[in-house]
Amino acid sequence: MKKNRQEKLLELITRYEIDTQDELIDRLRENGYNVTQATVSRDIRELKIAKMTTGKGTYRYVLPKQAESGSGVSFSAALIESIISVEAAQNLVVLKTYPGLASAVAAGIDRMNLHQILGCVAGDDTILVVTRDSDCAGTLAGQMHHLLRSI
């Protein structure tokens, strides 16, 4: 239950510009999680979620700082834990995630700004990453496998 709630919290923060705990509580409740302010506050602390100023001068919650791995790929540990499998096929990499988390993981991949990635398409639990060529797909899949083994 806690893991699912925290994964939904990460997804909501990725998808929406949320600036208060009350808004986060409302969105979690809309998604079937009956939470208290204390629970959300504890989840924010455990997930190392921070507040950042936007270009409009307001604040919003953001994902934890990305951790750098030895593979050269930066990725939030919480998002890494959302990935179930990684497979390369020609110039494509297919990632399977837990239900409802593909969008958040794809956004994390996009933020990596890797030159070999042309783009991502996310569904509910599957991400299709288009790379420049099959070598890039193999390298990316290898880096993702390395990250998955390191958690």
Image: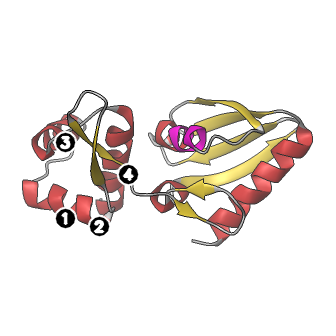
Q: CA distance from mark 1 to mark 4?
A: 14 Å
Q: Which residue is mark 2?
A: 46
Q: In the rendered image of this protein, does residue 104 appear above or below residue 51?
A: above
7 with respect to 92 (left or right): left
Mark 4 or mark 2: whose residue is earlier in sequence = 4
* Label number found at residue 76: none
Q: Secondary structure at mark 4?
A: helix
Q: CA distance from mark 2 to mark 3?
A: 15 Å
Mark 4 surroundings within 10 Å by alpha-carbon count, few (fewer than 14), some (14 through 19), many (20 or more): many
Mark 2 surroundings within 10 Å by alpha-carbon count, few (fewer than 14), some (14 through 19), many (20 or more): few
Q: Nearer the viewer, mark 4 or mark 2?
A: 2
Q: Quadrant of the C terminus?
A: bottom right
Callout 2, which amino acid? Glu
Mark 1 or mark 3: whose residue is earlier in sequence = 3
Closer-to-camera residue (51/38):
51
Q: Quadrant of residue 1?
A: bottom left
Which residue: 66% across, 70% down? 149
* Label number found at residue 7: 4
Callout 3, which amino acid? Leu
70 with respect to 5 (left or right): right
